[in-house]
Amino acid sequence: MPAAVSSNSCCLFYVVDWLPPDFGAVGQYAVLFAREMATTGRQVTLVGLTSGPSRSEVERFASGGILETTRIAISTYDKTKYASRLIWLFKANFHLIARVVRDARSRGAEILFTGAPPFMLFFAIVAKYIRGARLIYRITDFYPEVIIAELGRKSLPLAIFEWITWAMRRRVDLFQVLGEDQRKLLIGRGISPHRIVLKRDISPVPITGRERPMNPPQALSGYPILLYSGNYSVAHEVDTVVEGLIRHHHRGNRLFGFWLSASGKNVAIMEKRLRSANVPVACTQPVPLEDLPALLAAASVHLITLRNQFSGIVLPSKVYACIASGRPILFVGPERSDVHLLCSQARSIPYERVEPGDIDGFAVAIERLCPAASDQSSLTHFRK
């Protein structure tokens, strides 16, 4: 099986979307992995976007490795308008790849790119042939499959675009997948298993499970906390969670408060629906990375969600930090997702899975997790 990154080429260009301190899980993991590779003696150039001024910084390691981090300034866009999003994506991808191509060290180097920004594949393929580079595709998200799943249909233009995308994917030299569900999808579309390696994400910061909890919002004082942290957008299940929480508050014995430390289009929608049903809910912005362990320690139960149609094409990276925190996990999503695989293998924590659409199942599952949430010293394993 090939190595996740070839050792034959010293120079590696790692291209992502937003780099810290801007919020974005892909960039957070990229910093960790880029530094990890530089410590082995490689010359790594990490290229990403920033909402601040453009800048570069260099970090040198005892092994002789070098990590050069380049942040390219770019404005944000109106997420509600597809035209604005497409123009922004073209600009972002162009500037990121142009930065790589202009660098003389990129000739014959390795270019590792991700699914963020979307459609980077098409720009990376151009760089492959211009610079004679070796392409490594770390598939964080599948596009245009995500768009097709969001729309719930495949129009003729999207079907054609999907076919072209797979033709481009077959020109990639090596794939890094986040989970076994992604591996199966690639193999099912004709990608050789020998060109695929599994390299999972990890928790973006060290978490021991013994951190001092952050204080929850005042509105949730006295309630056990069902915590959702991170992004809550089109790939995440809404109705099962909202209606399940409402049903839980009508029937439950020990009632949870819902804390959304999150961004994304569904946050305001969920807050409005839950407030109108008198369910205790609080919404706050995602915390800085250094505060993540304390936030996760505040959870009585972690919530992870994924709509059925996004299984395999999206993997919520928050699962790793949630598992590391040692708190119970409630997953609303399909059994075939690697979220279920990872949580099932983490046998030191109570875990429940609910099928999307099963509102009664949600209310029952969260009730079953109550004893575990209230008494971490006597853990009982639950499986659905």
Image (cartoon, rainbow, N blue to C red):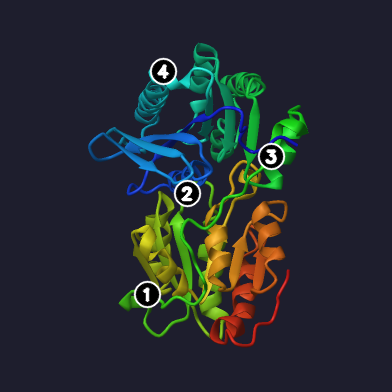
Q: Nearer the viewer, mark 4 or mark 2?
A: 4
Give the residue drawn at x 56%, y 39%: 141
Question: Residue 377 sits in which quadrant?
Answer: bottom right
Q: Nearer the viewer, mark 1 or mark 3?
A: 3
Residue 118 vertical position relative to residue 352 in the rendered view, above or below = above
Whichever of callouts 3 and 2 sits on the residue coming sooner in the sequence is: 2
Q: Residue furthest top?
A: 130
Say which residue label 1 marks: 214
Contact check, label 1 and label 3, Cβ < 8 Å: no
Residue 108 vertical position relative to residue 288 in the rendered view, above or below = above
User: The residue under label 2 is which amino acid type?
Assistant: Leu
Q: Which mark is residue 197?
A: 3
Question: Residue 139 sits in which quadrant?
Answer: top right
Pinpoint residue 11: horizontal percent, then vertical percent: 50, 29
Secondary element under disc 4, as helix, strand or loop, is helix
Say which residue label 2 marks: 32
Q: For this rendering, which residue is in front, 227 or 347?
A: 347
Whichever of callouts 1 and 2 sits on the residue coming sooner in the sequence is: 2
Whichever of callouts 4 and 3 sits on the residue coming sooner in the sequence is: 4
Q: Which mark is residue 104?
A: 4
Q: For this rendering, which residue is in front, 12 or 302?
A: 12
> Would you call the spot at circle 4 few (<14 residues within 10 Å), some (14-19), or many (20 or more)?
few
